[in-house]
Amino acid sequence: MYIWMVGVILQNNSKASSFHQWLVSIGKSEKTAKNYSGAIQSSISNWALDGNIIKESLSEIREPAQFYALIEPIQQLPVFLEKNTKGNGMYSAALRQYAEYLDCQTNQSVQEDIEEILSSDGTSSTDKATLVNARVGQGKFRSQLIDQWQGCAVTGYRDVRFLVASHIKPWRASNDEERLSRFNGLLLLPNLDKVFDLGYLTFEESGKIRLSRQLEDTQMLGVHSDMGIKLNDCNQYFMAYHREQCFRG
C-alpha cells in the first residue's frame, strides 16, 4: 500500500512538473508557473473533490473535452468564487492555462469534435460532411467567409491560400446552426487566428481591437493596438460572446 501511494504521488508530481515546464516555455515566470501548477494539483482539485465534481485530481485528467466540461461547474463553487476574487482571477487563469496545456499536449480537440459529429445518430450524412468541413475551416463555411471578408478581416491581406477560417463563438459552445453561420466566422492570418482563438485578443462593438494584458511580445506576433475590424450587426452577438467568455482580460 505504501509503495502504491508513493507511486501515485510521484506520478502526480511528474504531471504537475510537466505543466509547470510548459508554462515557463510559453513565457510565464517561475512564480506564476508554480502558482498555476500548484492551484491545479492542490487547491482547485481539493475544492472540486469536496464539491463532488471530480473523483480524482485535475492533474489526472488528460482529455481536453473532459476538462472543458468541468470548468464551469468548478467556477460556480462558492469557495472558488471567493478565493478567485481575492486572488484577482488567478484560479480562473490557472484553469484556462491547464485547458490550453491539454490542447497543446494532445492536439485531439478537433479530432474529438469530428468523431462526435460522425457518431451522431440524428444527423444525416450530408449534414455530417458539412459540419466536419466547418470544424476544420473548409467547405461552405470557408467559402462564405471568403465572400464576406474578401481577405483577412483585420489586415485586408487578400491571398486566401494563407488565411484561416476561424469561429468567433467557439465550436464547442455553439449549436449546429451557429457552427455553420458565416456571421460566426472571421478570415484571419494564422498569427491573428491563433491569438484570437486562445482569447488574447478580441474586438469591441465598434470593431476596435482589445489586447489582453497577458499578451507579451505583441510586436513579434504582428499584433498592435491600432488594429480593428468592420463588424456588421449579425457579427455582434458572436463577438459579444467572445469578449465575455473567451477573452483573457
Image: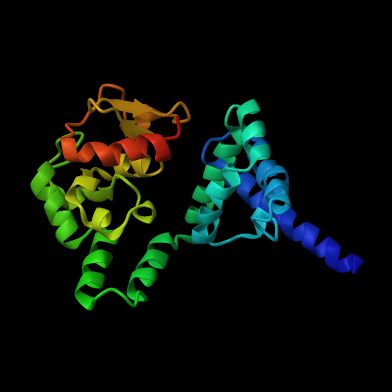
Count of labels shown? 0
Viewer-closest of 22 and 140: 140
Q: Quadrant of residue 152?
A: top left
What x and y, as percent, mark residue 126?
A: 19, 74
Q: Is residue 126 left or right of residue 191?
A: left
Answer whether residue 159 is visible to the viewer in this image: yes
Q: Quadrant of residue 54?
A: bottom right
Q: Quadrant of the N terminus?
A: bottom right
What x and y, as percent, mark residue 103?
A: 48, 55
Q: Residue at x 27, y 66 (%)?
A: 132
What x and y, as percent, mark residue 142?
A: 17, 55
Viewer-closest of 130 and 194: 130
Viewer-closest of 200 and 23: 200
Q: Is residue 239 left or right of residue 95?
A: left
Answer whether residue 33 is visible to the viewer in this image: no
Image height of 4 relative to 137, above or below: below
What x and y, as percent, mark residue 185?
A: 23, 47
**In the image, farthest residue toward the top:** 226
Q: Residue at x 21, y 39 (%)?
A: 235
